[in-house]
Structure formats: structure tokens, C-alpha cells
Image (spheres, helix red, strand yellow):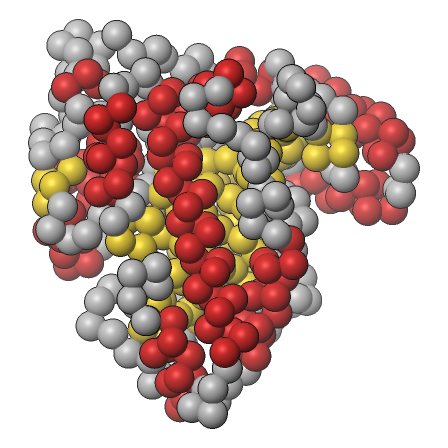
Amino acid sequence: MVEEAKDGDSEAEELLPVRDGVSCEEGGGGALIHSSIITLMHNKDALTHFRKINKNNPHPENRESNRQEIIERMEIKNEITMIPCFGFCKGLEEGSEEWKKMSKKVREACESHGCFLLMCDEIIPKGLNEELLKQMEALFDLPEETKKKHISPKAYSGYNGKDPVIPLCESFGVDDVHLSDSAQTFTNVMWPQGNPSFCETLRTMSIKMLDISFLIMKMIVEGYGLPQHYISDVENMKSSCNSRLIKYHVPESNNDCETGLLSHSDKNTLTVLCQNGVQGLQVLSRDGKWIELEIPQHGFVVIVGDVLKAWSNGRLHAVTHRVMMSGEKERYTFGVFAKPKEEMVIEVPHELVEDKVHPLRYRPFNYGEFLHYFVQTLKENALQAFAGV
Ligand SMILES: O=C(O)CCC(=O)C(=O)O
Ligand SMILES: [Fe+2]
């Protein structure tokens, strides 16, 4: 019997003291784990106010009381939504009590929200994020004819720019950086004279972020209390990956907000994103409201994709999200999209099927065929239409 997440209750217990704008809880025996929560409000006024007081206030203790004040105000209005923020530290050992506790929280967050925020600067040093995001500025500043030289027959790979549907967005996809010399090939095309530092940073960040994806997927298996042999399912579901480098331009008109990326669910297994501090990512809450994510500095966002949703028999929520751009600064995002190799078959573990509460929702399906179906139809409900039973 698989344990169920109770919507919302894990967040309520986690309103903890703020550290650097993030509330933290020390794990037993020396800060092994700190788990935390970021407050997300879909009321824009409150969010703006919250940002303002936190930015202008150098004293964490006052930040907390201000933050608490806002939270209370918003709770009264019943207009508050919480997306959990967890911290993974180096000493987080598989099988330890801290690991088990964290696994439960991760699984609950993925079921309730389909996403969470993550601080893990002991695993991925802050400097590395910053380095890549800075180097991405030089990449996108290259001449259009150079950028267009990065081509690929695969969806989400190659260079995409000047799409009239999403004119603010430009992106590069690079496949399987961890398995091949694709980072080197990409770098050589962009900088024929060489750019070893860019190549190395892209490789290291991709591998580290894919490792984080693996860790999270193992936590989900643990969170469901599934036998260890399902780790091989997880390995299959992250047997390939797409590293994506994205730039969102500043809207030209004086409009408040313009679409950077259309609303979608990710078609891969699990996505890990970092960004340059310019906010804009929004997730659709279960009650149909857009929530603007306030991603902490050096923080990551983890998003559940359709593959995990299918594998978990619909328990995990592949959250719909989009990017809205406002303000005067460009947004740069770097994402690692863990996915199965195209020949892989996604199949629900029999432990996650129960006749009454959880009858089988998805038939076994070939990942490459699913992707092909989506690219052909661009159906919003592609997973249901393709593999739903
Ligand atoms: O730029 C972002 O923050 C979101 C990117 C995204 O959702 C995607 O590429 O699928
Ligand atoms: Fe996405």
C-alpha cells in the first residue's frame, strides 16, 4: 500500500525562521539537512511589497517579522499559496533518517504542487551557476548567423529564435552532454577559435544538475516505499538529457507583462532550472491560479514532467507553467531536462495500481512515440490522449 500525500499539510508545519530570505530548519546532528519554504503569493501587490521590504532590510530578524506580517495578512485574505523550498546538503546520505524525511517531503511536494524550489550550494557551488549564466550572455550576443549554425533534427535541440509566437524567447538545446562530446561540438560551432571555459562550465553544470535529478527521482521511489529494484526504472527515465540555454528579451512595449514562454507541461521526466535572478516563471495552481515563483538567489526550481506523472500512475503532478516577462532586465535560464532514451518504455509499477482508488491510468508506452505524437499534434493533453486508459 502506498502512502498518500495530504494536500497542503506538509507546508503548514514548515513556517520556520528566515535565513537569507529563506526559512530554514537544521537537521539533527549538525545541519545535515535544512528544509525550508518560500512564500509565494499570487496577489501581485503583496508580492511586490514583500520583495521591497526584504530587499531594503539587511536585518534577517526584521525580515522575518515583516514576512510574518505579510503572511498573516495574506492568510486572512486566504490568498496565499506555498511552494516548498528544500535544501540538500553534501552529507545527505541515502537511507539515513534525514534522507527518508526529505524523501517524503519531496514526494509530497511533487504530488501537491508538481514543483519545488531547491537550495543545494554544497552540491552545485554558487559560483558555477553564476559563471554559466554570465557566459550565456556572451553566447546570445553572438551574431544571428553564428547562432543559427547550431542545428539539430530533434525537437528542443538546436537553436530556436525569432519565433513569432514567442518573440521574446531564444534558446539552444544540447543533447546528452553527460554521454557525449556534444558540449565541445556546440562550443566549437559557436566559438571556432575555442572557448574551453564555456564548454567546461556547461558540461559540469549539466552533469551536476542531472545528478540532482537522479537524487530527487530516487527520493520519490523511497517516498513511495517502492522496492529498490525500481531504481533501474529511474535510471531509464533519466538515461538521456537535454541541456537548454534560454534568453528572454525585455518586452519592447510598455506593457506590464508579456509572454516569454507559453503555458505547457514538460514532456520529459524531471526538469531542474536555474536563472539569473530575473523572475518570471509562473506555475498554475490546482485551483487554476497563476502563481509567480520567487526563486531565491542561487536557487533551483524542480518541475515534474509528464513521464513521471505517467510512471506514478497520475500521482505526481506535471504542473503547467509559463514565463511572463516584465521590467527592464533580460532573463537567462539554464535547464537540464532529464528524459528517457527514445526507445524506453514507460510502465506504471504494479505497486502503484489499486483497483479502487488508483486504477491504472496509463498504458505502457514508448517514449519516442509519445514525443513524436506531441510534436505532431501539440495537444495540451498529449499524455492523456496518447497513453491514457
Ligand atoms: O525559463 C524558465 O524558467 C522556464 C523554462 C521552461 O519551462 C521550459 O523550457 O520548459
Ligand atoms: Fe517547461
- Can you say which quadrant of the picture contains the N terminus? top left
Residue 168: x percent and y percent? 49, 69
Q: Relative to residue 144, is residue 89 drawn left or right?
A: right
Residue 248: x percent and y percent? 52, 66
Q: Residue at x 36, y 27 (%)?
A: 220
Q: Residue at x 34, y 11 (%)?
A: 3
Q: Relative to residue 53, is residue 160 drawn left or right?
A: left
Report the number of discs: 0
Is 135 above or below relative to 57?
Answer: below
Residue 45: x percent and y percent? 72, 40
- Can you say which quadrant of the picture contains the C terminus? top left
- Using the image as rendered, state which of residue 207 and residue 270 is in the foreground: 207
Q: Specify whether residue 41 is in view.
A: yes
Q: Relative to residue 256, is residue 265 drawn left or right?
A: left
Q: Specify whether residue 293 is in view.
A: no
Q: Residue at x 37, y 40 (%)?
A: 214
The quarter of the displayed image where residue 136 is located: bottom right
- Using the image as rendered, state which of residue 355 and residue 298 is in the foreground: 298
Residue 130: x percent and y percent? 63, 61
Q: Residue at x 48, y 69 (%)?
A: 200
- Using the image as rendered, state which of residue 271 and residue 220 is in the foreground: 220
The quarter of the displayed image where residue 20 is located: top right
The quarter of the displayed image where residue 187 is located: bottom left
Is 257 above or below relative to 135?
Answer: above
Is 87 above or below relative to 243?
Answer: above
